[in-house]
Amino acid sequence: MEEARFATTHNSIPHVKPVSFIFQDGAFYVATDHSTRTYKNIKASPRAAITVDIYKPGGHKAVLAQGQVDIIEGGQEFKKIYEVFFERFAWVRREPWKEGEAPFLKLNPTKKTSWGLT
């Protein structure tokens, strides 16, 4: 599973976009840019949701997590997560970035729901 949907809000209007993600140490990480609506929304209201799903007729599986978001722009955590993104995603290897150039959003789940999973 490489893609998920990440939801934020702006002026009480939902904003949902597809994202590449990793799940590590109990948190979801997504990459973004400083100029995105998602980044601006998180700066204004650091809460979000993510949905990861596999759709197969008669066997749909999904996870929804909601929680607080931290912006990771540098330091050891940034380096650790960047290494995983670099290894996992070809688009990161094609267009690499450094600390301070583009952040990761770390969603710390406070509520989780799933469908079709045991």
Image (tube, rainbow, N blue to C red):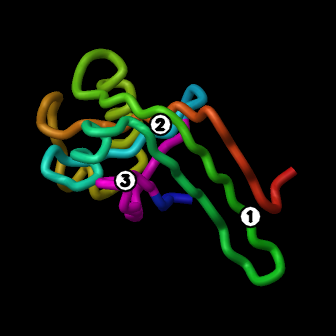
On screen, residue 26 versus residue 104, left or right, reads right
How far across and down, in percent of the image, does residue 81 sit? 38, 31
Name above or below for residue 99 compared with residue 88.
above
Q: Helix or strand or loop: what does disc 3 sit on?
A: strand
Q: Nearer the viewer, mark 1 or mark 3?
A: 3
Q: Nearer the N terminus, badge 2 or badge 1?
A: 1
**Residue lying furthest top:** 76
Give, as a single range, the part of the protein colored magenta.
6-23
Q: Nearer the N terminus, badge 1 or badge 3?
A: 3
How far across and down, in percent of the image, does residue 18 sit? 41, 64
Would you say residue 1 sits in the magenta stretch?
A: no
Task: Work out how far the residue at label 2 is from the one at label 1, CA to CA, in angstroms.
Answer: 20 Å
**Residue type (three-letter) at the residue carrying disc 1:** Lys
Question: Dot 1: within a 10 Å radius of its alpha carbon, few (fewer than 14), some, or many (20 or more) residues?
Answer: some
**Residue type (three-letter) at the residue carrying disc 3:** Thr
What residue did someone put label 2 on?
A: 107
Question: Dot 3: within a 10 Å radius of its alpha carbon, few (fewer than 14), some, or many (20 or more) residues?
Answer: many
What residue did someone put label 1 on?
A: 61
On screen, residue 24 versus residue 114, left or right, reads left
Q: Nearer the N terminus, badge 2 or badge 3?
A: 3
